[in-house]
Amino acid sequence: MSNQNTNVPASFRVIGVGMGIDEVINKIKLLELDGVSAEIAEYPYECIPGDEDKLAIIIFTDLEETANRIAYSFHDAGVLTIGISEDADPSCYDSVMLCDSRREYPEIIKALLQPIVTLGMINYDFQDLSTTLRDTEYFTVKSTSGESVKGATEKLKDVFHELDLTCVDYLTLNLYFNPNRALPIAMNDMESLSQLISKMPETVHVIWSVNHDENLNGDEIRLSAILAVKEKRECLRK
């Protein structure tokens, strides 16, 4: 059943540019996220910021000049503007994820949008995403899963070991579980996640949340991390 509320204004826009991007846009539409619109733009004048816009995610694999011009108009209007492409010009965006595979786009976008458009046990809203990404130049998304919070956290630790966390400025950790799982999440289950946070360099600003996701299988726990840097994009490369 769709949980989409047609009365919710589309404050969060996903804009696709270029060949083959329609498949990604269709997958974003299938997520049926409240307050999210997904569209394809062929020309910059077709896609301009509105008064209600808070976030624009621009995705493309070609026609970079068109995509960057669209992004610049949103960024110049004060809209949080995110780019996902190897050819995104950082000066036109608040933050850019360097990604050349369209297959990865839907999961990246879901990781950015899902927590801000659904109510969580420990909530994460648009302002938290803005704190994490605004004017940070580069970001990446890393996700793991396991049958327990500890299992998912241990896998994320392994991912973090391959990154240079000393130059990371902002880190968001969003934890998801199925509210119908056999064993409810208890506070002591969060100890491993708290330990991971405590071991972050003192310079890293950390925000975290706990969210429901009825699409997860059984007792599966999913942990999604958004890491952002103001410079030195190579720190986010494995």
Image (cartoon, rainbow, N blue to C red):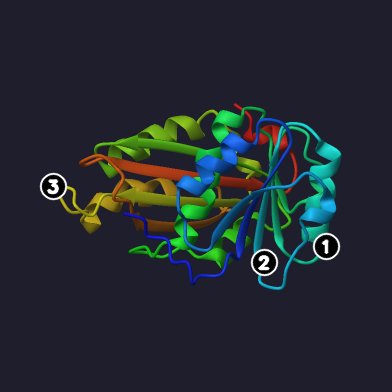
| Label 3: element kind | loop
Q: Which residue is mark 1?
A: 76
Residue 48, by quadrant, is: bottom right
Amino acid type indicated by mark 1: Asp
Which of the two labelled residues, at mark 1 and mark 2, occupies the earlier sequence position? 2
Residue 234, by quadrant, is: top right
| Label 2: element kind | loop
Q: Which residue is mark 3?
A: 182
Residue sitting nearer the eye, 133 or 214: 214
Amino acid type indicated by mark 2: Asp
Q: CA distance from mark 1 to mark 2?
A: 12 Å
Q: CA distance from mark 2 to mark 3?
A: 40 Å
Q: Is residue 87 visible?
A: yes
Q: Residue at x 86, y 40 (%)?
A: 65
Which of the two labelled residues, at mark 1 and mark 3, occupies the earlier sequence position? 1
The correct choice, above or below, for 128 with respect to 41 in the image is below
Which of the two labelled residues, at mark 2 and mark 3, occupies the earlier sequence position? 2
